[in-house]
Amino acid sequence: MAVDFLSHLNPSQKQAVQHFCGPLLVIAGAGSGKTRALTYRIANLVLTHRVDPENILAVTFTNKAAREMKDRIERLFAEQQALTEYGQSLQSLPGHVQTKLRSQVYKSITKDLWIGTFHALCCRILRFDIEKFQDEKGRKWTKSFSIFDESDAQSLVKDIIINQLNIDDKKFDPRSVRYAISNAKNKGLTPRDYEREQSNFKGKVIANIYSVYQDKLAENNAVDFDDLIWIPVQLFRQNEQIRAYWHKRFRHILVDEYQDTNRTQYELLQLLTTNGESARSFKEWDYRSIFVVGDADQSIYSFRMADFTILMGFQQDFGDGLPDDDTRTMVKLEENYRSTENILQLANDLIENNTERIDKVLKPTRGQGEPTFCYRAQDEIDEAEFVIQQMRRLEAVNSDLHWGKFAILYRTNAQSRAFEEILVRWGVPYKIVGGLRFYDRKEIKDVLAYLRAIANPSDSLSLLRVINTPRRGVGKTTIEALQKAAIELGTPLWEILSDETSIKTLAGRSSKGVIQFVEIIQRWRAQIDTVSASELVQGVLEDSGYVRDLKAQGTDEAEDRLQNVQELYNAVLQYEEENEDDKSLIGFLASASLASDLDDTEEESTKVSLMTLHSSKGLEFPIVFLVGLEQGLFPSYRSLDDPAAIEEERRLCYVGITRAQERLFISHARERRLYGNREPASPSLFLGELPRELMDSNTKAAIPKKFTEKKPQSKPAPVLQSDVEWSVGDRVMHSQFGIGEVTNVFGSGSKATLAIRFDNLTGMKRKILPIGDRGLTAID
DNA sequence: CGTACCATGCTTTTT
DNA sequence: GCATGGTACG
């Protein structure tokens, strides 16, 4: 091998990367180079062991991680090619040669690797094989199936409870029923299995709702998120041939973040690895491997049915059962290359308080570093002020620090507000990572519903969403009549819609609108295989009048929506570019359903990052602020009386601490706004578990001066609003939304209203504000 | 049929 | 304190 992969690695990493056949559990502490171990091992399989890339399956936790892994593997191979073909490093070659090499590598290697999330990979499997599946009640799907998102699933459950079964939705809260169904699927229970497990009335009713829910999904030719994994598992259980095919196909399986897999995902892995034999007795390990990487201390998704005891049981299941020191099926990566020694000590001390774990410490490889500072704030506003003062101080002193190197991590999304307000006030650029997905915006869901209705004629939910969007005079009564007819005749809604005589009798005055709508869907459905996804999107946007309607509204909000719709079109184009082998509409719809908001956050940013602790997993920042360490907030009040839940919160805290490379700041407030009320708050349990000798705080005797002086000096002076005559083009400053420009003035005098475009807002960039809004000031 | 206003309940965390 | 969903009215 021309590139010496192994020279960059420590002995444990080397052992992991060189592993060829059989099971291996890699216990990878935070910052221990596990992504490197994974990518190098894949490269090593192909280069050294001549494994066909087609035979490799790698599971990641996010789409972003999948992209990055593919990218890193591609670079590794391109580097290798550069050395063998040109005798120099990739970097030193001219740009077009680099591109050429990378595209060669793509065609011959990376294209054939299956790398993605459980959901994306299973979705791909289903597109091959879902038509061979039939569930316990004979329910069936076709490969143009829709993927229902959480809100689709939620409203389906609600509809079943209220309309289908006439149950009191006070006694059966749709949300918790939906959660119960999801949990059943994640534990590998069919409606019948679930029914059998229930002893009381309530459980039996939920089992019935679960069964009807599956009926409805099948009727719509739709699956929910959990089904993407759950259906392949059922299919592999029942169909030996299909199972054998995929078993043979994926000779080498790699799984990242193994501690966050659930029972169903585990069963999938087991069926693929052993072809259904019990893992412990599986003997055919020649040219076959299961390589899982994880860290029980970073398991933070049990609310999603993730079960880290699966990781702890790996050695029992697949392994040789020998003690840790002798085993050949476990490797521990304990050297930490990310954080200073002080930070690691904090993390180690904290996690020691957990009882359920695999023994492991993070070993420092860097310097001691500075002590962590813990700030006790008066309230959440004071806390935010502390954070920004520290950031400004550090940024001013260190020339190599820019805003992109800071992160603020919190337990709940609602905590972001105080920080946003103050960041805006100081003009510090920031971005919120996670939060509202692009594909969850109303206008985007509308357009996707058109596309889903076209791709999947059974998808009544999508049809109903857009049958009167934009307004075609099809109202509630008409829709109810149509639905009723569909139920009585036992046919999909589309059958009724596409029958013109039925429509004329059923819809009366509204029939014109319905017929018009049906025509659009039919026209584009006829072209689904001949026209590209982007052409189809453009055509639908035009024919449906969706764009025309938004333009006609002429409001600022409508204009923002228009921009988002345009962006969706760009997303389709981008999809087509990135997926040359599958440019279909169905392919795009699947990728849209599986996209998360974390996926398109650029790594090299110059903005402060704000996110939940969950979103921060896998990331690192030179300077981290871990905020809101209060009982009831972090740990969450819902976990206070459950020791296992407290341990999970502690792991979450551990994840937060280990994101920091150079400096860590921790804060908590004495009181905090909750639902609009001020509530007193006490310090988090976790604060007491951190070693005091490695920390400074403002509650100790000596309070550094910089922490006592508050109120920014350069805060803009307030201006009396009634004195200002506003006109279009004026620049304004708002305490909450930041800097903006007036785009419209409605009315006059003291009652006037302004439309203002703010640069800092995400999504709806415009706000309509009364002229007397207290936060509003003029600039220049 | 569409809009405007009012009440409710809500905050864990997300592929 | 806010977003969502339901009801009443035009």
Image: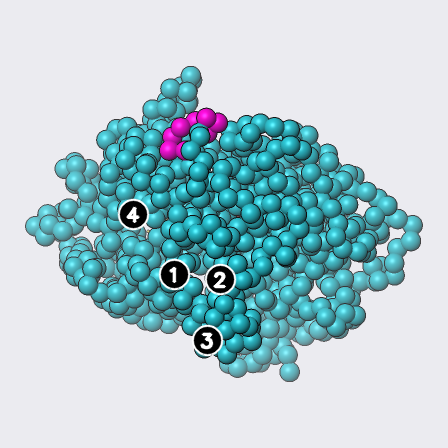
Chain colours: A cyan, B red, C yellow
- For the residue pair A281 and A379, the one nearer the viewer reads as A281
Tally the numbered discs.
Answer: 4
Numbered circle sitting on residue A77: 2
Circle 2 packing at 10 Å, graded few (<14), some (14-19), many (20+), is many
Dot 1 or dot 3, earlier in sequence: 3
Using the rendered view, name the quadrant where residue A441 is placed: bottom left
Q: Residue type at mark 1: give it.
A: Ser
Q: Are marks 3 and 2 on the same chain?
A: yes
Q: CA distance from mark 3 to mark 4?
A: 36 Å
Q: Measured from the top left, where is residue A667 in percent x and y?
A: 74, 50
Which numbered tag is attached to residue A127?
Answer: 4
Q: Using the image, name the chain to which the residue with label 1 belongs.
A: A
Do marks 3 and 4 share a chain?
Answer: yes
* Chain letter of disc 4 in the image: A
Query: Marks 1 and 2, how far apart in space?
Result: 10 Å
Chain designation of label 3: A
Residue at 54% of width from left, 62% of height from top? A2
Q: Which residues are magenta?
A: A274-281
Between disc 1 and disc 2, whose residue precedes? 2
